[in-house]
Amino acid sequence: MKIVEGFKMAGCKRWKHSFVFAGIAIVCPTMALSQEFTISQEFVRLEPKSAAVLDRGPTPPPIAIDPASELDFRRPNLDALTQMPRTFGPRAATALSFPIVKNNKVATSNPHFLGFDGLDHRDQRMAGTGVFANTQFSLEPPDQGFCVGNAFALETVNTALAVYNKNTGALASGPTSLNQFFGLLPEVIRSTSPVYGDFTSDPRCHYDAATNRFFLTLLQIDVDRGTGRLRGGSSILIAVSQTGDPTAHWNVFKLNTTNDGDGCPCFGDQPLIGFDANGLYLSTNAFSLVTGRFAGAQLYAMSKLFLAGGAPPPFVLHGGLPPVFRADGSLPFSVQPSNDTRGNEGAHFGTEYFLSSFDITAALENKLVVWALQNTALLNSSPGPTTVFHLFRNVIASEVYGVPPDARQKIGTLPLGSLLNPGVTEILATNEHRMQQVTYADGHLWSSLTTGLTSPGEGDVKAGVAWFSVKVDADEGLLNAAVDQQGYLALANGSVFFPAVGVDAEGRAAIGFSVSSPSLFPSTGYVKLGGGSNAGQIHFAGVGVNSEDGFTGYPSVGAPCLNAVLCEARWGDYGAATVDADGSIWLANEYVGPRPRTFAGNWGTFITRLSLGQDDN
């Protein structure tokens, strides 16, 4: 067991302390046998940053965007800085094949349904008042965070956020620039010599009913103000509402992530969030800002109770998972913390569960990795000699899943494409099979991912959804886990992608997703899950009105192309799902809606509320 002395304080030098803290003990059972290994832990400090409030200033007058210069102002692309390691050798030869899946039926009605438009590209591009007016970049794809509490529905997409009346869909506050909200520098001041501000991305949010607080997280990277190039500093910003009203005041904290990983300075890509009765849990995929190489998955845990009270927690637990393949062929990547609908504080002084894909670099896979962090109640007190956390890991068998192909869409009008690359049409990026949002309910972890699959009578592999319900139980020194239910979603001659599972406290679930086909514009949909491997009919929620026609899908701005006339547009990278106090399940996903577009993009988001009645599927 590795021993770490002292604290690492964000923004401060390491200093000695009289206590000695034990490392995280990890018990790692494979499919055949158990193996125990350790990683080091360190305790770090969360830095209080500022207070924040959603901007309530007057909406600025409409700004005429110059099409000739709009695409000249583009922020740095992180794709070159997210290089994955090569596939583990023995796994590359595994004889798996894409699953053959019967297509789901399509519903003709949507009972117990409410839906409304959320943030779109225009909202994100034009967010900001005062000195923040006209300082946002045009961004694709629209990474979504979404949460619901009290009378409010909060959505945050890319670098903007807004609050809605959850009963009517009416806008209550925003759209607000996230750089403005967090007290950062504007993304870009458009002038003859542009001035660049903080790079921000990948927002997430959560409403915690136990504390009656909204939590919002955001990736931040320092940039050179003259060139916009990424520099060495990075952090995760955490905002916590001071009351149950997200339109009022918030407290903001900063977690320095610059040195967390191998080959740093690093940044923590796509911060993932989870909650149990004791803590807020963060997981990132660290990448080096120097080489772009994967620097290891990073786990963080801190007291949510202190944050809810407006104070920094006594410490933040940090543990790094090395960026190397395990002996069993697995690679820790996108280790998704779970959101606990009722709290699991009784199990071994608090247990938080995580779930991840087995090997993100493999073309096909049939295993999952379950994790459990024990002793989370210790997050609520000052550290001492007995402050020891245990992380357990279990590899379990699952249905087959693998890398999905891009999604085709119905072709409509392409005003941007006709200017940039006439004759080119876009397909939608579905990325890979990383694990999506995880919910713990009634002793089970629920999650889903995008996978390649085929259907009878259809020759080509297409994008679909694999979903899982994993029964878990953490005994002292042992993590028991096994898939209890699992299944697939498939649309006839179409694609289903970027799912998010919402689960109520009784374990009733629904999955929201984006969906498209050669005869369907990019839309949003959902299914309700039945018993066993049964999923209900596909319901269309937000029905698309045109093709995706955004700037990332045309060769003049660097889009990857399958051929001279078919190029990939960014989509996703993730949707969101949550459950309300009344048991309603809320879903937030991307589509192309009816509202006015900007020059550079036309994506929108759609928010769905479901009541899981027994008389429909």
Image: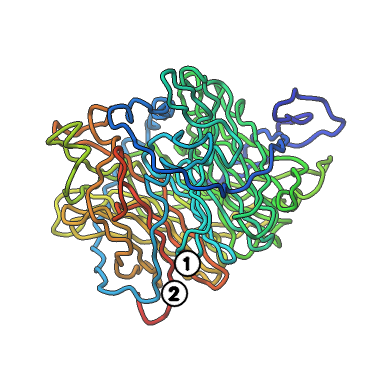
Instruction: Give the residue type that dot 2 points to.
Output: Leu
Q: Earlier in the sequence, mark 1 or mark 2?
A: 1
Residue 585 disc label: 1
Q: Is residue 95 left or right of residue 433?
A: left
Residue 612 disc label: 2
Say above or below: 59 vs 324.
below
Q: Is residue 85 visible?
A: no
Q: Secondary structure at mark 1?
A: strand
- Where does the image place residue 362, in percent across and percent down from the top left? 36, 38
Say above or below: 159 vs 543.
above
Q: Is residue 417 left or right of residue 191?
A: left
- Where does the image place residue 273, in percent across and percent down from the top left? 56, 48
> 247 or 507: nearer the eye?
247
Asked if the residue at tag 2 contacts the one at tag 1, i.e. Cβ–Cβ closer than 8 Å, the answer is yes
Q: Farthest residue toward the front?
A: 61
Instruction: Tell me the quarter of the picture where residue 256 sits.
Output: top right
Instruction: Answer few, some or many: residues within 10 Å of disc 1's Cα (few below 14, many 20 plus, some between 14 and 19).
Output: many
Q: Is residue 354 visible?
A: yes
Residue at 24%, 60% in the rendered image: 491
Residue at 62%, 44% in the rendered image: 27
